[in-house]
Amino acid sequence: MKANGIRLNYLDWGGSGPVLILIHGFSDNPHIFDDLAPSFTDSFRVIAYARRGHGKSEANGPYDNATMTEDLRGLMDNLRIPKASLAGWSMGGNEITSMAGAHPERVDRIVYLDAGYDWADRSLAKAFKTLPVPLRTPTSALKSLDAYRRYNHTMWFASMDDLRPLEAYFRDLVLIHPDGTLRERMSNGVMKALWSTLTTFHKDYTRVRLPALAIYAHSFVPVRHGDPTQLAKNLAWERKFFVKFRKSSIERIRCEIPGTKIVRVPGTHQDFVFTSRDRVVSVMRRFLLEPN
């Protein structure tokens, strides 16, 4: 569908009741919600879309936060959704913050899915330069879909025994050549532009005057399951950079969005919705369905 002058691919799980829109993170796609979305269709119409430059949506710039927020508003307009609750994962927290601040009449409630962070914070930008897990997939992991699954299992989803809920997600991240080798769907140019937005856009929580829920994962990178050598690197990075950043982020959101509900759950930034699925669903449902 067209929204804000660009073609956006979206998923609609159906359901009845008010609308819940799920927004994925940096370099991800809406299939990351395949396992989560059906848990809400008894009470909500559930939608997720591929942000510009992601998944099967058009890869046309610009990629600044204001433009991507207007993409969200355009999606709602074209689908004739006057008002919705918004749940943003990771970078998706940027759009829900801006949408709630700029167009509060279009938003009921917002949920930060390990997204209550200011990704443009200088200390975090410095930390990401030494992130122990590569942001771009190495060539060796693009030799086949099996190799790609193994790599992602090792680096990001080590806590998950069953990767089947991620199959459509993995396939939407890559293009498969006739010989079985892969190419990442997102180009280096688009990733660079999105990274620039991620690391320069500062959230303005003070404009949010709506009910908010912020769910935080135990860690950003895997620190409990996986290869011991990689885990040692991950744990050192987590302790050096992210523990303090998470604490200050929680304190800030509590201060700037009074009444925000804060919940901590086991898991990592990338897998907590799967490893703590029941807890996440329970907390979200209670928050989204409670009377105003």
Image (cartoon, grey):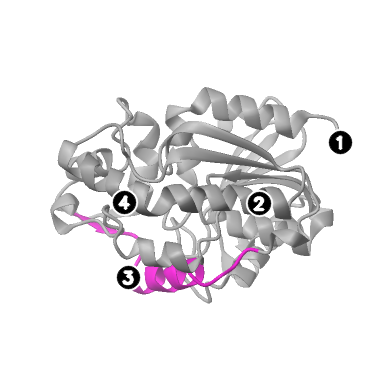
Q: CA distance from mark 1 to mark 3?
A: 44 Å
Q: CA distance from mark 1 to mark 4?
A: 41 Å
| Image quadrant occupied by the C terminus | top right
Q: Secondary structure at mark 3?
A: helix
According to the picture, the residue beneath numbered tag 4 turns out to be 237
Q: Which mark is residue 292?
A: 1
Q: CA distance from mark 3 to mark 2?
A: 32 Å
Of residue 58 and residue 24, the one placed in the foreground of this image is 24
How crowded pointer 2 is (Cα within 10 Å; few <14, some 14-19, many 20+) is rated as: many
Q: Is residue 182 magenta?
A: yes
Left or right position of 125 against 43 = left
Q: Secondary structure at mark 2?
A: helix
According to the picture, the residue beneath numbered tag 2 turns out to be 253
With respect to residue 267, does 211 lie above or below?
A: below
Residue drawn at (45%, 35%), measured in percent from left and top? 272
Left or right position of 164 against 95 = left
Q: Quadrant of residue 279?
A: top right
| Camera-side mark, 4 or 3 | 4
Could you tell me the amino acid type at mark 1? Answer: Asn
Q: Position of residue 190 (x, y in %)?
A: 40, 71
Q: Position of residue 224 (x, y in %)?
A: 30, 32
Q: Range of the magenta residues?
A: 181-203
Residue drawn at (56%, 73%), measured in percent from left and top? 64
Upstream in the sequence, badge 4 or badge 2?
A: 4
Q: Which mark is residue 241?
A: none
Could you tell me the amino acid type at mark 2? Answer: Ile
Residue drawn at (35%, 48%), measured in percent from left and top? 238
According to the picture, the residue beneath numbered tag 3 turns out to be 188
